[in-house]
Structures are given as structure tokens and as C-alpha cells.
Image (cartoon, helix red, strand yellow):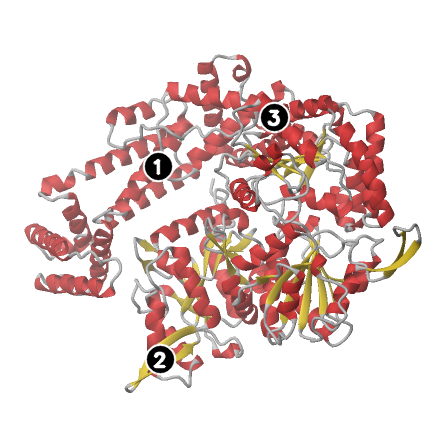
């Protein structure tokens, strides 16, 4: 049933409320159909011309015209490449050459006045028609100085069948149909009032993020209110700031990604800038920026470095890490964003190189180095105040400010007392007047005073709870397999001692003690029998629960290098064909055996492995690591980590965060524990926020996820309590196939709209919960979950608009068999509509008859809906009049069905009648002696009801044929690119219509229909 609410407050109502909101923010409003303009130009041209003249008031008209020409003619490339050029123009202006008389000059024309907000034009427009590959009408566009920088797709908040994901799909469709509109786009918005999210042209749905605050104070609700989102992002000053300073491109090699800062990054960076300004004129302590791992800390550092250039008049930035691999990773991120930073970062290779880079430098520069490259210099490297030191992972023990006295014996046996200076003190001595800011993904330990001494207090905290709530990261769960490995109490005691040693982290005596314990631990954990048992269990767990999940990527963390090699060899002994599937990533030593070197390889080999592991389609699925890749290494699809190494504190939290990245429908990361890290996890959480401790104090899948799985399974069973699906568990393949299709038919009944929606939501959560705890679930329950998952997938396939496909009984049996195999091994989703070659055909009377006789009437309705929608879609590309006519007919029929005015039987008959009329319409042209192309033009010419009162039919047919011939004769290859070709075509059409005295007086709208049809034909003639 269509609710009264949906009639009272529909998509148009929501659109109007957004417009009102923007008018309150002093945006000018225009209604698209009221504006005279070129429908093929993405700009609001009159506004662009006026705005550029106003912003560049001292520049000659010829310079402005040269900039507009350059703007309109961005060189032919991919959409992302064109958008990269446009964003550079938007942020930095357009460099042009122009003639002032006979003299050639160069200058920069600015598209936005970032200093004087009132000098810019802010317009919100709705129903703005744009024609390119087809005609589209985006819901809302924000024009900034005539440029369509923000495009919004809205969905009705009162219609159950639509949601924000539908808006995202619509945007992706627009990018295919009207790509030019997205060349000039900065931000994309999708909203259904409950959820509003912003992203870019390269963002997947999972990367469209909410904006949860207007002024920087955190919203503690799951979803921010829609007005908070729009007012938070689109206040005039805020929008300009975001466009200028918080949108960048990251060139990843495999592709270029456009990144829009999240609200947490935006406000934290702004706070960090203010804190830095204060520190420069006070004590040099800029503070600590704590954003939990996976929430985009590296990119926040990029945004911060970018904004510093403007706010502090080109300071020199020194980025310090404590390990070479972290230095490489962070340097790599800055290098990918060098165009945004407008300078190339430099990596200091040696201490001398660092000295060279700093000595004598007066300004500019982003220099990367490790702490170890600083020495106790007699003279400071630089005494300048405009040096900002950005320290990554700031809370390491090596950041000591104090001097210590170390006593040891020399060769003669005499005791010598030597002064040892902490690394932080060395850095301070080298750069005494610099300002220091720390960036970290884990909180500072309550015991760690030195970090606060060096950097000061927290600037901003973005904890795990907030990051997961915002969808910036996924939660991490753990499963204990210590029992499976049967480690004895003595070994577990030894592991606890090792945790204790590591918790002290840095003192010399602790390091010495650790070295002694290390050999004992290596001997126990590296014993052949123990490693063999470990590998057997990892293989069982991986192959039965994780291999078919997402991309199948997993990481094994080994205690030591020698144990890593043992694990590697044992796996290949049991799975000899896994040579491409398995890799070892660790540092190499001078005394390594020759066979190790071939496996570990050099730096290039490690980089190659990193690229393969990040590639979702590569054969490399399992990486065995020791220390490398445990911090700063991001593989979003990585969902499984097997831990065979004691870790504690921030080292542990950083390691397990490798599996918390967002990827498609990933429910969370799973850490499989073989050394008893539960206690260490709880101890590590002591330094987190109270919210984090409350939410993540217990992450054991057996206590958290398994009960959730049972709860969701019970809900799904309750939703199907009237349907008998017992034959799915013990029936034949045929019976199983019938059980599934019967279940789909049961749940898609029009009277069960609410139950269907609940089922899709609950079954998805059931599927996600099973992905985390499948190793704990008995086979009988996995089978029940597999049944509900197959029904969920089929319902979704039926619900999606687009091409329908007919599935034969044998094909369905094959799919169901595959589903059952997978569901017992894992919980992989099987697409029951994929790889089916036979399509539904609306022109196959036999098939239409078969559908009408289907026992499962709800399925029949869905199949017919998809079938007709597909054919109407075909008409949209060829015949504008018929597509409108049939779209209206199908909508009226479905509305009657949803309102309960038609039964299943009646709606099937109505849809069959419509299908037959669509099929029959193909033959209309034959009766008139017209081809399909000609019929489309005939339909356009005769659309006005009274038109045949003014013309003989022969006249109309003659005009149709001449019109078709004229277009065919004059269609040029550069039709879709050149406005001149389009203008010529329009002129020819108008001339021809005038010759036939078409249209009659008072029917000017008829010309618009003919024009649209002509342009549709031209756009699709070669497709």
C-alpha cells in the first residue's frame, strides 16, 4: 500500500525542503525549466561570465575569454583525469596566454574568490535538464560562479522501496549518461533525509560519508539530522574552504582516487593549525592528534601540511617516523598527493643528507626522515622558527627528553659512566626553535609522560567508537584458538612474561632480558610439532571459513623470522600449488641462509608483493609477516589475521587494525589468536576512551557475534514461520530449488512489503555475523543460514531494475548445488542470476504464456515488471514518445496494484496486455511504411492530440521521411563533441519544419518534442 505520508511528503517535498534550507543560508534559488540556456552546456553560462569578470576585475576580457575556452575544452581523457584538471583550475586558477593588442601576455584567471566570499555567486537549482548521451534531470545542483560544483540526488524519505543506495546507483548512471556534468563536479551528495552522505566521483558507496556536526562538536547520534549535514558542509565559507583545502587526488598507480575529507578530518586539521600557530609563539608544543587507526590519519597529515603552507607562509615541514618502512609508507602517501601539496616531498637517505636538506634552507620543503638520523650535533641544523616537525606514531619510548647515565666496563675492566641522550632531546637540540606536533592512531599511555613533554596535550580525539559509528572503520573481533593449539601452561606463562617485558618498551636492561627470553620463546613456539599443529589449524580455519570471504586475503603474524620461514615451508609442503598464493614479508639479515634470500627477496620484491597483496584480483592471498606491514599498511579487503606473536599496548592495537578498513559489505575484521592476546587486548584498552572501553572491552566472537548470529537466525525463521522450508535441509536438488523459489514468492507478496524489508535487513546481518563466527557454527545452522542467504540474494536480484534473465531448472539446480557447497565451507554469496545466457524476451508469446501460468504469482509479477522496464528502457534510447507513454502506463498499473485495486491475477493480465501492446507497437511502422527510426520521428511529430486535424497523414509521413533522410545525411562523427555540429542540425530541422508549416499556431511545445527526438536519434544512431 502507498501510505498517506508518501502522498503528503514525497521526493518533491523533500527537494523543496532542501531548497528552503539553502535559501536560509543565503543561496539564490533558480528553477531549471525557467532558465533559457543551452541544454548541452554543463555551466550556468550567464552566471559564469558575470562572475569571472567580477572576480578578475583588473584582467582584460580577452584573458577571461581565453580562460573560459580552456575551461570548456579540457583535453580528451578519462572523466577522472578531466576532473583532476578542473579541480586544479578551481583551487589554483587557470594559467592562460592571451593577446593584449599585438603583445602576448600570460596571467592567472581565478574561478573563485577565496578571500572575499561575497564576491562569489552561490545558486541552488533544481530540475536542471542536461542532455548528453541521453537527457537527464538531476534533482539539485549547486552552482558556484556558474560552475556545477555540487550535484545532489535525493530519494523520497517516505517510500519504503527506495533508500540512499538507490541515489548512489542513480549517480553512477548519470556519470555514464551525462559525464560532462561530472567533469566540473567537486562534491556528490546522496540523501533520503534519514541518511545524507557526501563523496566524490571515484567514491564507492562505502566511501560516501555523513557530516555530523555544524561547528566541530561531535554528534553522538548514529545518523546526523539532514539539516546538520547540509548546514555543516554547505555554509558558504565552509564550502569554499572544503573545495580549496580539503579535496585532493591520490595517484595510486592502479588508479587515481579523488578524496574528500571527512568531518572528523576537517575540524581536527583546523584545530591543529590553530594549535600550531599558538605553539610557534609560545613553547613549540603543537599537541597530539589522535585519530584511531584506519580513519585516514595519513591523509589528515596531507591536509594539515597543505593548509600550513597558506596559514604559516610556507614553513619547512619535517616528517619523522621511527622505522624505515613507515617512512616509506607515509612518504608514499605524500608523493601520491604532490599536485595538491604543490611541491614534491624529499626523503633524507642519510644523516648527512638530512643535514644538507636543512642547513641553509629558508622556507618551503617537506622533508621525510627517521628519528635514527638525528645525532647529538654540536651545532643545530637550523634555528629557524618556521619549521614544523610532524611526528608519526608519537608515543614511542625513544622520544625521551632526559639524559641518562649508562655505566659499563671497558676493555681493561674499568667502569665507565657515559651520558646517553634521548632521541627527542637530540631532535630538540638539532631544531631548537621548531614547533612539534604528534600524530597517532592509538592513545598515549597514561605512564608515558615524555610524549606530553615533547608535544603537549591532545588537539583532537577521534576514537574507535566514533569511527565505527561513522563507517570510517570496521570493528575488530577476535577468536581464541589457543586451546586448538594446546599450548601448555608453562608456555603461556612465558608468553605473559614476554608481554610484561614489552609493556616497558625501551629500557636497556629490559632489552637485554628480552633477548634472553627471545631464544627460549623461539625454541618453544618454533618447535616442529607446534608449528605443524599451528599450520594444520590455520589451513582448516582459512579454507573452511575465510578463503571465500570477500577477496580471501589473510595475514599470519609470526613470532620471529625463523618461525615465519617454518610456517611458509610447512604450508607449501601441505599445499604445494600455493606458491603464488603465499608470500613472506620480513627484513633480511646479512647472515640469512641462501634459501631464505630467494624467498624474502630485495626491496623491489617486497614492493611487488605489497602491490599484489593490495590488488583484490591477484593470486597472492596470504602474507606471512613478522614486523613489516603491521603498521601503516592498508589493504581494505583484508579481513583475517592469524596472530602467533605476543604483542602489547599500541603495537598490538596497530597490528590488529590492519583488518579494520572499510570494504564493500565487510562486517568487521577477525583476529584469530594462537598466543592468548585477550589479556593484552584488555590492558591495551585501558588508555582508550570510556566509550571505547565500554564498546570494545569484549570482542570475542563466541561472546559477541555468535549470540548475534543466533538472534538473527531466529528472526529470519520467525519471518518465514508460515512457510515450510524443511525440504531444503534434506531434500533433493530439485526440491531445494523449488523450496528457494517458493520462499522468494512467499516473501515478495505485495501484502508482505514490511516483512520483505525486515527480512532483507535481518538476513544481511545474519550473513555478516556468520562471516565472523562460521568456525563456531554447527553445520545444521549453517545450512539454515545458507537457505536464507540464497532467498535474500534472489529477492535482491528481482528487486533491482534492469535486465531480467530467465533461469532454467537445471541452471537453478547447478546454482543451488554450488550455494550449498559454499555454505558448508564458508558463507560465500552465489549470484543466482549470473552467467545465464538465455534472456527474457517480451516478443516471445510462448514465454509470456508460461509466465501467466506460473503457480508463483508474485514471482510472475516481478518477472513481468523487470521485462517491461527493460523494454521501456530500450525505447528511452530510441523513441521519446513511446517511452513516456509506456512508462506512464506501467506506473499507473503498478500504483493500482500497490494500492490493492488489482489482485495478483489482474496485475499479471494488465502487464501481459501492456507487453503485447509494446510488441505490437513494433509493427505499427510496417503498416505506415516506416522504418523504426522513421516511426520514432512520426510519433514525435504526431504527439499533440489535435495535430492530425491540421495535416493529412500523407503530409506527416512525407515530413517524417524527409526529416529522417536529412538527419542521416548530415550526422557527423564529431556530433557528440562539437556544439557547432549540433547547432547546424537544429537549424536544418527548424528550416524543414518551417517548409511544412509545422507546428500549427499555439503548439510550440511540439517543436521541443521533435528536437529531443532528433537529438536522441543522433546520440544513439551508432550505438
Crowd tier of the residue under label 2, counting other residues whose Cα lies within 10 Å: few below 14, some 14–19, many 20 or above? many
Q: Earlier in the sequence, mark 1 or mark 2?
A: 2
Q: Which residue is mark 1?
A: 803
Secondary structure state at the residue bearing disc 1? loop
Q: Which mark is residue 166?
A: none
Q: Is residue 125 something one can see in this rendering?
A: no
Crowd tier of the residue under label 1, counting other residues whose Cα lies within 10 Å: few below 14, some 14–19, many 20 or above? some
Q: Nearer the viewer, residue 66 or 32?
A: 66
What residue is drawn where x is 35% and y is 27%?
Answer: 806
Q: Nearer the viewer, residue 972 or 673?
A: 673
Crowd tier of the residue under label 3, counting other residues whose Cα lies within 10 Å: few below 14, some 14–19, many 20 or above? some
Marks 2, 3: nearer the viewer: 3
Image coords of residue 572 (percent x, y): 58, 25
Residue 635, compared with residue 837, is above or below; it is below
Q: Earlier in the sequence, mark 1 or mark 3?
A: 3
Q: Earlier in the sequence, mark 2 or mark 3?
A: 2
Q: Which residue is mark 3?
A: 571
**Disc 2/disc 3 C-alpha distance (Å):** 67 Å
Residue 841: quadrant of the picture:
top left
Residue 411 left/right relative to 927: right
Q: Which residue is mark 2?
A: 63
What residue is drawn where x is 10% and y is 40%?
Answer: 927
Secondary structure state at the residue bearing disc 2? helix
Marks 1, 2: nearer the viewer: 2
Amino acid at each position: 500500500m502507498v501510505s498517506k505520508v508518501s502522498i503528503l511528503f514525497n521526493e518533491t517535498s523533500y527537494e523543496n525542503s532542501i531548497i528552503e534550507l539553502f535559501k536560509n543560508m543565503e543561496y539564490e534559488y533558480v528553477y531549471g525549466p525557467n532558465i533559457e540556456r543551452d541544454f548541452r552546456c554543463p555551466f550556468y553560462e550567464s552566471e559564469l561570465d558575470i562572475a569571472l569578470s567580477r572576480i578578475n576585475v583588473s584582467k582584460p576580457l580577452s584573458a577571461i575569454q581565453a580562460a573560459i575556452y580552456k575551461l570548456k575544452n579540457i583535453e580528451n581523457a578519462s572523466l577522472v583525469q578531466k576532473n583532476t584538471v578542473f579541480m586544479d583550475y578551481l583551487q589554483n586558477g587557470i594559467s592562460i596566454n592571451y593577446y593584449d593588442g599585438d603583445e602576448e601576455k600570460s596571467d592567472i584567471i581565478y574561478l573563485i574568490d577565496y578571500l572575499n566570499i561575497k564576491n562569489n555567486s552561490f545558486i541552488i537549482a533544481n530540475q536542471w535538464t542536461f542532455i548528453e548521451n541521453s537527457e537527464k534531470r538531476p534533482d539539485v545542483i549547486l552552482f558556484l560562479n556558474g560552475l556545477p560544483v555540487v550535484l545532489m540526488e535525493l530519494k523520497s524519505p517516505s517510500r519504503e522501496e527506495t533508500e540512499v543506495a538507490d541515489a548512489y546507483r542513480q549517480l553512477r548512471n548519470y556519470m555514464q549518461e551525462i559525464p560532462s556534468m561530472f567533469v566540473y563536479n567537486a562534491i556528490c551528495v546522496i540523501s533520503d533525509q534519514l541518511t545524507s552522505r557526501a563523496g566524490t566521483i571515484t567514491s564507492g558507496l562505502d566511501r560516501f560519508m555523513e557530516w555530523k556536526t555544524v561547528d566541530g562538536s561531535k554528534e553522538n547520534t548514529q545518523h546526523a539530522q539532514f539539516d546538520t549535514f547540509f548546514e555543516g558542509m554547505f555554509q558558504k565559507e565552509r564550502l569554499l574552504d572544503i573545495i580549496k583545502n580539503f579535496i585532493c587526488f591520490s595517484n595510486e598507480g592502479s588508479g587515481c582516487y579523488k578524496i574528500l575529507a571527512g568531518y572528523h578530518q576537517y575540524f581536527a586539521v583546523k584545530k591543529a593549525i590553530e594549535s600550531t600557530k599558538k605553539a610557534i609563539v609560545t613553547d613549540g608544543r603543537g599537541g597530539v592528534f589522535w585519530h584511531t587507526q584506519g580513519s585516514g590519519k595519513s591523509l589528515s597529515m596531507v591536509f594539515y601540511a597543505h593548509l600550513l603552507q597558506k596559514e604559516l607562509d610556507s614553513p619547512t615541514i619535517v616528517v619523522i617516523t621511527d622505522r624505515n618502512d613507515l617512512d616509506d609508507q607515509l612518504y608514499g602517501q605524500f608523493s601520491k598527493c604532490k599536485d595538491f601539496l604543490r611541491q614534491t616531498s624529499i626523503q633524507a637517505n642519510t644523516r648527512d643528507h638530512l643535514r644538507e636538506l636543512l642547513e641553509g634552507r629558508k622556507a618551503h620543503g617537506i622533508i621525510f626522515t627517521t628519528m635514527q638520523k638525528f645525532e647529538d650535533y654540536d651545532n643545530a641544523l637550523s634555528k629557524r622558527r618556521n619549521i614544523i616537525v610532524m611526528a608519526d606514531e608519537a608515543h614511542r619510548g625513544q622520544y625521551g627528553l632526559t639524559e641518562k647515565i649508562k655505566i659499563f666496563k671497558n676493555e681493561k675492566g674499568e667502569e665507565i659512566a657515559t651520558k646517553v641522550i634521548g632521541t627527542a632531546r637530540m631532535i630538540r637540540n638539532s631544531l631548537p626553535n621548531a614547533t612539534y606536533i604528534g600524530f597517532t592512531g592509538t592513545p598515549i599511555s597514561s605512564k608515558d609522560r615524555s610524549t606530553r613533554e615533547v608535544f603537549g596535550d591532545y588537539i583532537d580525539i577521534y576514537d574507535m567508537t566514533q569511527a565505527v559509528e561513522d563507517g570510517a572503520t570496521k570493528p575488530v573481533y577476535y577468536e581464541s584458538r589457543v586451546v586448538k593449539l594446546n599450548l601448555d601452561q608453562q608456555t603461556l606463562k612465558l608468553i605473559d612474561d614476554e608481554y610484561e617485558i614489552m609493556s616497558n618498551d625501551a629500557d636497556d636492561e629490559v632489552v637485554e632480558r628480552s633477548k634472553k627470553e627471545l631464544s627460549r620463546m623461539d625454541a618453544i613456539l618454533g618447535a616442529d610439532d607446534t608449528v605443524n599443529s599451528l599450520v594444520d589449524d590455520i589451513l582448516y580455519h582459512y579454507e573452511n571459513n575465510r578463503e571465500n570471504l570477500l577477496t580471501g586475503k589473510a595475514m599470519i603474524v609470526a613470532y620471529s623470522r625463523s618461525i615465519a620461514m617454518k610456517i611458509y615451508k610447512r604450508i607449501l609442503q601441505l599445499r604445494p600449488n600455493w606458491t603464488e598464493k603465499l608470500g613472506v614479508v620480513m627484513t633480511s639479515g646479512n647472515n640469512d641462509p641462501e634459501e631464505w634470500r630467494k624467498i624474502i627477496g630485495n626491496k623491489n620484491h617486497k614492493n611487488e608483493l605489497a602491490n599484489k597483496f593490495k590488488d583484490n584480483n591477484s593470486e597472492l592471498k596470504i602474507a606471512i609477516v613478522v614486523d613489516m606491514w603491521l603498521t601503516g599498511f592498508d589493504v581494505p579487503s583484508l579481513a583475517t589475521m592469524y596472530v602467533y606473536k605476543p604483542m602489547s599496548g599500541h603495537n598490538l592495537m596497530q597490528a590488529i587494525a590492519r583488518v579494520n578498513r572499510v570494504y564493500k559489505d565487510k562486517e568487521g575484521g577477525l583476529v584469530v589468536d594462537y598466543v592468548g592476546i585477550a589479556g593484552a587486548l584488555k590492558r591495551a584498552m585501558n588508555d582508550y576512551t570510556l566509550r571505547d572501553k565500554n564498546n570494545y572491552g569484549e570482542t570475542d566472537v563466541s561472546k559477541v557475534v555468535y549470540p548475534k548470529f543466533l538472534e538473527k537466525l531466529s528472526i529470519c525463521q520467525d519471518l518465514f514461520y508460515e512457510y515450510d522450508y524443511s525440504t531444503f535441509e534434506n531434500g533433493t536438488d530439485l526440491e531445494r530449488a523449488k523450496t528457494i523459489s517458493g520462499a522468494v514468492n512467499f516473501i515478495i507478496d505485495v501484502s508482505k512489503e514490511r516483512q520483505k524489508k525486515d527480512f532483507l535487513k535481518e538476513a544481511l546481518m545474519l550473513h555478516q555475523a556468520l562471516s565472523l563466527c562460521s568456525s563456531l557454527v554447527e553445520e545444521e545452522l549453517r545450512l539454515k543460514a545458507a537457505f536464507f542467504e540464497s532467498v535474500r540474494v534472489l529477492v535482491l536480484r528481482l528487486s533491482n531494475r534492469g535486465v531480467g534473465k530467465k533461469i532454467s531448472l537445471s541452471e537453478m539446480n547447478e546454482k543451488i548445488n554450488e550455494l550449498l557447497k559454499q555454505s558448508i565451507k564458508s558463507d560465500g554469496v552465489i549470484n543466482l542470476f549470473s552467467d545465464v545466457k538465455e534472456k527474457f524476451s517480451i516478443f516471445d508469446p510462448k514465454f509470456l504464456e508460461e509466465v501467466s501460468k506460473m503457480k508463483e504469482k508474485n514471482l510472475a509479477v516481478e518477472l513481468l515488471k523487470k521485462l517491461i522496464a527493460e523494454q521501456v528502457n530500450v525505447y528511452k534510447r530510441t523513441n521519446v514518445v513511446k517511452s513516456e507513454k509506456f512508462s506512464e502506463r506501467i506506473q499507473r498499473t503498478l500504483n493500482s496494484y500497490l494500492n490493492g485495486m488489482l489482485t495478483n491475477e489482474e496485475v499479471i493480465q494488465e502487464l501481459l496486455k501492456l507487453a503485447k501492446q509494446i510488441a505490437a507497437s513494433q509493427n505499427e511502422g510496417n503498416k505506415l511504411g516506416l522504418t523504426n527510426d522513421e516511426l520514432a520521428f512520426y510519433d514525435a511529430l504526431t504527439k499533440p492530440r489535435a495535430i492530425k486535424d491540421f495535416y493529412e497523414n500523407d503530409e506527416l509521413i512525407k515530413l517524417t521521411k524527409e526529416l529522417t533522410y536529412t538527419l542521416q545525411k548530415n550526422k557527423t562523427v564529431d556530433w557528440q563533441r562539437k556544439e557547432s555540429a549540433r547547432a547546424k542540425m537544429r537549424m536544418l530541422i527548424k528550416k524543414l519544419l518551417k517548409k511544412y508549416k509545422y507546428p500549427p499556431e499555439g503548439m510550440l511545445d511540439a517543436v521541443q518534442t521533435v528536437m529531443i527526438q532528433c537529438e536522441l536519434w543522433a546520440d544513439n544512431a551508432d550505438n
